Amino acid sequence: MQFAHPFILWFIPLVIIPIIVWYVFQHRNMNPAMHVSTTLPFAKLGRPFKHYIRHAVFGMRLIALAALIVALARPISHDSWRESTTEGTDIVLAMDISTSMLARDFDPDRLGAAKQVATQFVNGRENDNMGLVIFAGESLTGVPMTTDRATLTNYIESLNFNMLEDGTAIGDGLATAINRIKDGQAKSKSIILLTDGSNNTGNVAPLTAAEIAHQLGIKVYTIGIGTNGNALMPTIDYFGRMTYTPQPVVIDEATLQEISQMTGGRYFRATDNKVLKQIFDEIDTLEKTVIDVRNFSHTEDSPVTFWLIGLALALAAIEVILRHTVMRSIP
């Protein structure tokens, strides 16, 4: 047990010792006297019971005062650490938000399906330190590494295809994700890269970024999102309007597979909403790392405080009762 105001305890010797000295000095010569010719009849009577009760009452008064001083010092429960183990890791989601992610082979489209599944994945990883990178023709850190699930999910829900210049810079997206996660404290670090195309722009080649991830011990799980065959793909017509026309689905699966193999991850192909959800569920089971967690317990007022106040009040009440009954004196 600790005290919120330990300096108040100094009042115990500073107050009680002077009171004891005063009590001894006051009662030193307070013995009653009566003139008689001989004391032989009283020799065997001894000291009366009230003589001892008088000092006991004074002792109760001191104990009550000390109890009040200790209560004012505010006893609190000990701060304590509780150690436990849990599962957690560092994860960065690298999501393609290029215009092609509006293809309608998913419900409502590829981007909408990816946002829904990614949100569920984030909310299910309570102990992870997570970040979000988006890429199209360029890459951007949407959310740095954080444990704030609300910030992550709100940003994912706000994703839109026109947030970045159009294109598919897979290498840049992967390189940005590596920069975000490389300084993480967890032993296990992984990147989930989701795209629906092939690298066609950017400053960093996808395999160059994968080699860097391999050297840093970062696993990369790659997901190619898109149905087999044709899909309704967004196109801009002569008047600048977006329309949808059937086009072949082209995903550079070879590069995505090589990225995952090089870094110790895995490649997945998502052909519909259900498969995409199953992929994230599988990654969720793969990326589990046992970590030590230290939980700090909050300080609370100790129940001893109320017992001390109750003791002081009870002793004060007993003293009043004794002084007006057993210890009652006639001037």
Image: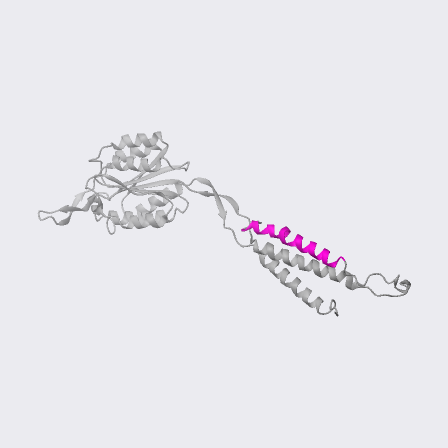
Q: Up-down: is 327 above or below 230?
A: below
Foreground pick, 302 / 223: 302
66 is within the stretch colored magenta: no
Q: Quadrant of residue 253?
A: top left
Q: Is residue 266 visible?
A: no
Q: Is most of the magenta stretch helix, strand or loop?
A: helix
Colour mode of the rendering: one colour
Q: Position of residue 29 (x, y in %)?
A: 77, 59
Q: Quadrant of residue 74?
A: bottom right
Foreground pick, 305 / 49: 49
Q: Is residue 104 left or right of residue 296?
A: left
Q: Is residue 325 left or right of residue 287?
A: right
Kindly identify the residue that appears in the image at 67 percent across and 60 percent down.
Answer: 61
Region in magenta: 4-28
Q: Position of residue 247 (x, y in %)?
A: 17, 44
Q: Up-down: is 113 above or below 47?
A: above
Q: Is residue 160 left or right of residue 185?
A: left
How many discs appear?
0
Q: Position of residue 308 (x, y in %)?
A: 61, 58
Foreground pick, 212 / 269: 212
Q: Up-down: is 115 above or below 186?
A: below
Q: Position of residue 234 (x, y in %)?
A: 17, 47
Foreground pick, 314 / 27: 27
Q: Is residue 99 visible?
A: yes
Q: Up-down: is 200 above or below 78?
A: above
- On-image quarter of the C terminus: bottom right
12 is within the stretch colored magenta: yes
